[in-house]
């Protein structure tokens, strides 16, 4: 999650520098409710004392309103299309979410 958060911040700064307005907060979807709770809860507990610096960075971005974390079920993660074995129906559902189309839909045309 920390790598994606860093990429979000970098892309936002790049687009802002290029004059493209990007609304904040940037939404980051995760399927791990524990990670979301740790990143959004500013209170340190005995069980979370081992947390590394990158988690504090995510907490700061959430507190600043730069990033918003949201839960998404594992089945709806579009990344699973590229990283997991999925059924044919799930494949086409996720491909549709990514706006992927079959190549024959583009034939005949420029």
Image (cartoon, rainbow, N blue to C red):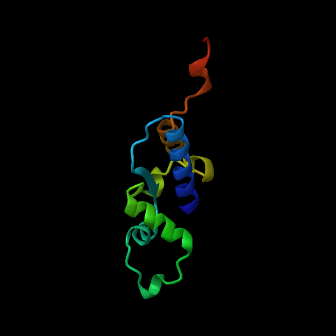
All told, the count of numbered labels is 0
Q: Residue at x 39, y 70 (%)?
A: 37
Q: Pinpoint residue 45: horizontal percent, then vertical percent.
A: 41, 84
Q: Place residue 65 in its image quadrant.
A: bottom left
| Residue under the image location 45 percent in, 54 percent down | 28
Residue 67 x, y percent position in the rendering: 43, 55
Between residues 26 and 103, which one lies in front from this camera angle?
A: 26
> Considering depth in this image, is 108 or 48 the residue closer to the camera?
48
**Relative to 37, is 99 on the left or the right?**
right
Q: Observer-nearest residue: 84 or 4?
A: 4
Taking the spot 47% from the left edge, 35% from the top edge, the residue there is 20
Q: Residue 17, image x and y in percent?
A: 53, 40
Q: Residue at x 44, y 61 (%)?
A: 61
Residue 80 location (% of width, % of height) = 56, 51
Q: Is 77 situated above or below 61? A: above
Quadrant of the frame with the C terminus: top right
Image vertical order of residue 17 relative to residue 63, above or below? above
């Amino acid at each position: 999650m920390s790598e994606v958060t860093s990429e979000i911040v970098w892309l936002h700064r790049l687009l802002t520098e290029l004059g493209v307005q990007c609304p904040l907060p940037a939404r980051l979807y995760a399927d791990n409710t524990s990670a979301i709770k740790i990143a959004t809860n500013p209170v340190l507990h005995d069980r979370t004392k081992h947390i590394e610096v990158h988690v504090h960075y995510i907490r700061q971005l959430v507190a600043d309103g730069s990033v918003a974390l949201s839960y998404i079920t594992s089945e709806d993660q579009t990344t699973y299309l590229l990283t997991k074995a999925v059924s044919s129906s799930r494949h086409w559902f996720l491909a549709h979410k990514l706006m992927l189309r079959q190549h024959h839909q583009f034939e005949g045309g420029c």
